[in-house]
Amino acid sequence: MAAASASSLPSGGTARLLIQCADRPGIVAAVSQFLFEHRANIIHADQHSTDATGGRFFMRLEFALAGMTDTPEAIEAKFGAAIAPRFEMEWRFTYSARPQRVAIMVSRYDHCLMEVLWRWQRGELPIEVPVVISNHERLRGQVESFGLPFVHVAVTPDTRREAEDRALHCLDEARVDLVVLARYMQVLSPHFINRYRERVINIHHSFLPAFAGADPYGRAFERGVKLIGATAHYATEQLDEGPIIEQDVVKISHRDSRDDLVRLGREVERSVLARALQWHAEDRVFVHANKTVVFR
């Protein structure tokens, strides 16, 4: 998979090289030697193979751009010609000087939205937020208090496709890399998902695969479970069945009401979504066969 190079890549900061391919001897040596020859100083390196023999290999390298002998454009071109074909790699370079542009889609609940915006405002999330889209007006004031554009796209059963097309147009205008569904209570069509394949992160308020779909807290309360949780995953055409990025749980007891479950669950939702977004933004998540490898 060729890298998506731009015409003017950054010359400062750090770069990341993300690789996955069939596992075989020599991959680490070849990649490390390539970077060494171009005087790259490797800062972090992670790798994983799904099997000792014949598995899938994943690698994330972060290195400083200062002091390298070639421009980033030239490095990408040389890697794509010399190393990637030899191992039939899926690969890409990303750059710290170019944070991902993340659109947030939200409905009525503000807890996940505010967690992301607070962390973004504090500089804890390496992202840009060009727009927030909602099917309700309720959260406009909170979003605009952060100095961000708020776009209201109403959705009804009769206007679902038109509303989705308007949202997609907005995302295109904002040059968005990633979409975060911060409790956006609408099911996205395959048309939308395919436009942002593995680039839509959803937060579901249960520990999937338990209680997928609507009202998981109510069903958990009726079942009398002792743990509830939240799951951040990439959205796919199958509701709540996409590759899981992060999960967490909190203990509950017979003393907790349904409202208690909702309150406790929202705390977990916030942190789980924020961690998943951070790991994606830092290029720590690899997807293969509806599962993820996450280098934390």
Image: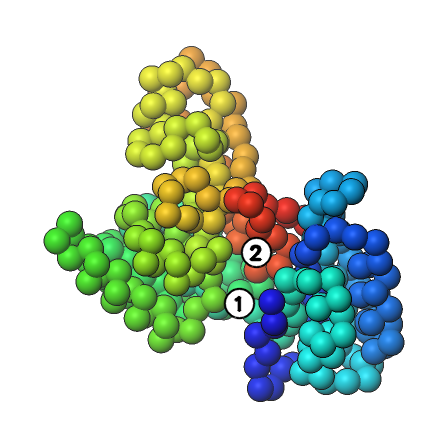
Circles 1, 2 touching at the beta carbon (< 8 Å): yes
In the displayed structure, 100 sits above or below 6; it is above
Give coordinates of residue 232: x percent, y percent: 49, 44
Closer to the chain start, of discs 1 and 2, is 1
Q: What element carries label 2?
A: helix
What amino acid type should be assigned to the residue bearing mark 1? Gln
Residue shown at 75% from the left, 66% from the top: 86
Give coordinates of residue 197: x percent, y percent: 45, 58
In the displayed structure, 185 sits above or below 136; it is above
Q: What element carries label 1?
A: strand
In the displayed structure, 277 sits above or below 144; it is above
State the image quarter where residue 94 is shown.
Answer: bottom right
Residue 52 in view in this figure: yes
What amino acid type should be assigned to the residue bearing mark 2? His
Q: Residue 280 carries which label?
A: 2
Q: Is residue 205 left or right of residue 54?
A: left
Say few, some or many: other residues with alpha carbon within 10 Å of mark 1 (under 14 / 14 to 19 / 20 or more): many
Q: In this view, does 54 lie to the left or right of 136?
A: right
Residue shown at 32% from the left, 25% from the top: 218
Residue located beneath label 1 in the image: 100
Residue shown at 23% from the left, 54% from the top: 136
Task: Check the picture and name the quadrant holding the N terminus.
Answer: bottom right
Residue shown at 37% from the left, 47% from the top: 237
Residue 272 in view in this figure: no
Q: Is residue 128 left or right of residue 13?
A: left
Q: Residue 279 carries which label?
A: none
State the image quarter where residue 81 is shown.
Answer: bottom right
